[in-house]
Amino acid sequence: MALDARIPEGPIAHKWDNHKFDVKLVNPANRRRFKVIVVGTGLAGASAAASLAELGYQVEVHTFHDSPRRAHSIAAQGGINAAKNYRNDDDSVHRLFYDTVKGGDYRSREANVHRLAQVSVDIIDQCVAQGVPFAREYGGLLDNRSFGGAQVSRTFYARGQTGQQLLLGAYQALANQIQLGNVKLHNRSEMLDLVVKDGVAVGIVARNLMTGAVTSHSAHAVVLATGGYGNVFYLSTNAKASNVTAAWRAHKRGAYMANPCFTQIHPTCIPASDEFQSKLTLMSESLRNDGRIWVPKEFGDERPPGQIPEGDRDYYLERRYPAFGNLVPRDVASRASKREVDAGRGVGPLKNGVYLDFADAIDRLGRHVIEERYGNLFQMYERITGEDPYVVPMRIYPAVHYTMGGLWVDYNLMSNVPGLYVLGEANFSDHGANRLGASALMQGLADGYFVLPATIGDYLAPQLGSPPVTTDDPVFAETQRSVEDTISRFLSINGTRSVNWFHRELGKIIWDNCGMARSTESLEKAIAEIPALREEFWNDVRILGEGDTLNQSLEKAGRVADFLEFGELMCRDALHREESCGGHFRVEHQTEDGEALRNDDDFAYVAAWEYTGDHASPALHKEQLEFENVHLAQRSYK
Amino acid sequence: MKVTLTVWRQPGPSATGRFETYEVDEVSEDMSFLELFDVLNDRLIGKGEEPVAFDHDCREGICGSCSMMINGRPHGPELGTATCQLHMRKFQDGAKITVEPWRAASFPIVRDLVVDRSAFDRIVESGGYITAPTGSAPDGNLILIPKAVADSAMDAAQCIGCGACVAACPNGAANLFTAAKIMHLNLLPQGQPERWERVTNMVQTMERYFGSCTNHGECQTACPKEISIDFIALMNRDYIKAQFKQRRLASQRG
Amino acid sequence: MTKVSEAPKARLERPVHPAPKEGRRRPFIVEFYGSAVAKKWLMAVTGIMLMGFVFAHMVGNLKLYFGEKSLNQYAEWLKEIGEPILPRTGLLWILRFALLGAVVIHIVSAAQLTRMNRRARPDRYKAPRDYAAATFASRTMRWTGVIVALFVIYHLMDLTWGVGGAEWTSGEVYQNIINSFERWPIAIVYIVANLALGVHLYHGGWSMFQSLGWNNGKFNDWRRMFAIGFATIVVVGNVSMPLMVVTGVVN
């Protein structure tokens, strides 16, 4: 099947406006006849649900959290980009578009990215109107900072809690609609399958996590805003419950999974301290503005950092990238750290980190300035490691942070399954092979507030007069039975190992073989090991308790089972992509200096995988990427 | 390290619960308190016992899921810290630690240490928003907000909704949560049109679910974001004013 | 497993306090009093009235130290203020009724809020609590309040109605006080009750600012100072009287 991205005609700057004029509309009086299910209440889900309800659609929201406000968008620290040009530093929609395409290493769809840059401006206005307390200057105007190596100040922020504040804004808008009766909220309700009838998405099957009740829900359209799959690595900065289940079950029902190998590794996380480590904590990228990254030159230098003289230190980023120094993009900084640690120059008890040193900055600016800028981050670091970063350099190491890949969607954000829309991190569309800092929040809100509400009418309008397929339809009973069978199967295995053990094992396989650097050999190894682990899981996992109560092992079992399938596809995608780009680094494809080497001739496409019923042979569909407005160039940060 | 955990076990909302004691050894002091529970649970599963259910998610102190009463204090002994950010190095080797769920009539126990905090959502739904439908917003810089006001609103808006304030309050009151939610919006210029309506509705909803404030100050000490009870005073002031306000004249200054 | 159906009502949480009946509009005062925040506000307002009384009462009675004539004259003057526009003891009765009203509102609100709070946490913590901020004073308000209330009744019986057991003559305020306080168990009752009053004022004198919403970074530190100062002055003044009498310094 050919993938039609349905990119509108016309010059890039007019595509979105033209498209909005061309899409079919639903009359305001008719909107209440349409029912839409939104799964997930992060930035994308909550903003979409609220906006659709404001338009007049009947919305049903599912979140597996106890409250919509707890979705993992809440943990984003840094900020949100918008091409406002409040700083008079020559920012523009076109520049944000250009930076995003380039930063994504030319693997994103131009039209989508341009639209993202266009609506970024409206997002800020919308959030301010909702009462998001963005940082202000003394004159009362919005404050901006430059972020993640961008050359303009376009990042809006609310202390180190921008994600939290934006999510609360969207959640409050959602709460308003719940109060008005336009949205029906199902909390602690986890989507476990997509219901597809005659190739069209008609509803979902969900399990109430408190009572164990499995129920069917039907609608005219289903919107997935269920986040990324970073937890396939087990250790990541994602929240513990973040998972691929909703997206994966949709994939198994026909939706294509695009570019799953594009995962982002964030360079500044706190390294794992022991085998019990359950997750990694991100330290804001802004720390690299003042901190200097180094390792001892000598292998196995056991001296405490303070006693290692300047001459024995290797400030490897400054040495290798004199122009950008410590501020090189995330993927470059991450790989450089890995190189040092792999070479045996790592620091800390487990030799698994590099130093991020503020001594120079403290000498130059004074401790109070550093305190003002990073006080809360330093405090967080101290709390986690028990070390005082004002005295001892921080130890950092890269960790999985964001996943650019996801379900394939067209320009309208609809997947190849009609009626199934995918928003936010769960789709693949805007970040290519690497996401820029402060762009995830922008994309989630763009999709939810502005894109979906404008495009969903195009699908719904022709269905006027036809009610949604009812849950009495056999297709619902069938889907529900398969969900219930899986649950019963989990509970009946009664093996010897905990779900967590399998997750950790899978994480090790993926991190070692499909992490920051990938090779044919490592990927083939992973592809051999994962099915074996999967089989062991289905024979030996131990899930105690019942299905009709809160059962956290059971919940997690379903998620890990899906990761065990998804992980294999991710490795297969990484193996097929014979090039290095953005977060995907194949050791076979690098320049003489060890930089990523893209292959635009053969791989300037989106790899969309179709589930064929056999994990070993997914079908590949290609969406060729056309670059008409951005000139393809090799990134260089020397 | 080795610790003795006494944990509240309750199989379901209407079941009777009781304390169970577990010895956990080989505890690393770099572990977080929740990782201690991960280890405990893995060992329980190994022994064929059901693991302890507890709420957790982001494990970086911002989602507000974790909720444990540790040695008689919500989120444990460390000030300004959620359970997930509490590390074992804060405890002595051989420590005896008692853990029970939040207790309040409107936080019914779902299982073990998991409680249902949906009552907080009901409070927010009753008015914790600014009605600003998507699409109608003016430019963000058209509304000037003095830095001090934005900072103060942010101080309130930091609330993570964990419920420690209710858990800590001897009266089971939710005034700190509600005040933080109300004052975040009532301090901002955008929040003014709905200010009096908001405070009235949210306070009245809060009072249907929770107890009343008698100014102990336990809540601000328990709060992982150290939100000040000053906001409760501001909420009280706004609530009383709202009762006497002639709403049709609300747009007049003073 | 369940059949195909709409999601069941899985919400566990429900309001613990009854909602006001829909429909009929209730009079403003009933509506207002229905709220706990308003009750606390009323408790603060009535608390201020009672604090004013306690303070004036204490200052007036310090005339004890200026001799019999001074105190008795003051007592007589209390009956005369407001004359001639009001009849003799007119204003005094107005004040008495106002105080009685304040006491009733203060106590009834407190009792209703206590009930509300009990309902808000029917199951107490099973392990001991480790309070971090709540003070002895804040946690014993209802007990110190009860002690003070019972004491006030006895105090009225003793020195206003003359049925407290000591020899009592109307108008002979000074002598009545001496007669009463010379009994050491009664002096101790007075002292203990006033200490309880002090503890009550220590929390109440600060807490009322919160309940009234008087909050400003510029004077917040002074609120606690005020409460400490006020409680101390009242306690020292009031306790000194039975103490001086029972030790024989004043007779």
Image (spheres, coloured by chain):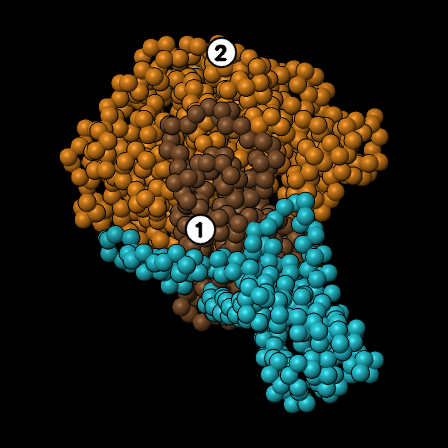
Q: What secondary structure is found at the residue carrying circle 2?
A: loop
| Mark 1 or 2: the one toward you | 1
Instruction: Decide which of C50, A63 is in the foreground and name it.
Output: C50
Q: Position of residue B152 (x, y in %)?
A: 59, 40
Residue identifier under label 1 = B243
User: Image point 35% across, 41% down: which residue?
Assistant: A177
Residue kind at label 2, given as amino acid type: Leu
Q: Are marks 1 and 2 on the same chain?
A: no
- The image quadrant where one finds the C terminus of chain C is bottom right
Q: Position of residue B219 (x, y in %)?
A: 58, 56
The chain carrying label 1 is B
- The image quadrant where one finds the N terminus of chain C is bottom left
Let me know if residue B99 appears in the view.
no
* Letter of the brown chain: B
In the rendered structure, the colour chosen for chain A is: orange
Instruction: Decide which of B126, B104 is in the foreground and name it.
Output: B126
Residue kind at label 1, given as amino acid type: Gln
User: Image point 62% across, 74% down: which residue?
Assistant: C148
User: Left or right: A435 with respect to C155?
Assistant: left
Q: How many marks?
A: 2
Which class describes the residues within 10 Å of circle 2: few (<14), some (14-19), or many (20+)?
few
Tell me the tag on residue A274: none
The chain carrying label 2 is A
In the rendered structure, the colour chosen for chain C is: cyan
Instruction: Decide which of A617, A597 is in the foreground and name it.
Output: A597
* Residue B208, quarter of the rendered image: bottom left
Q: What secondary structure is found at the residue carrying circle 1?
A: helix
Residue identifier under label 2 = A632
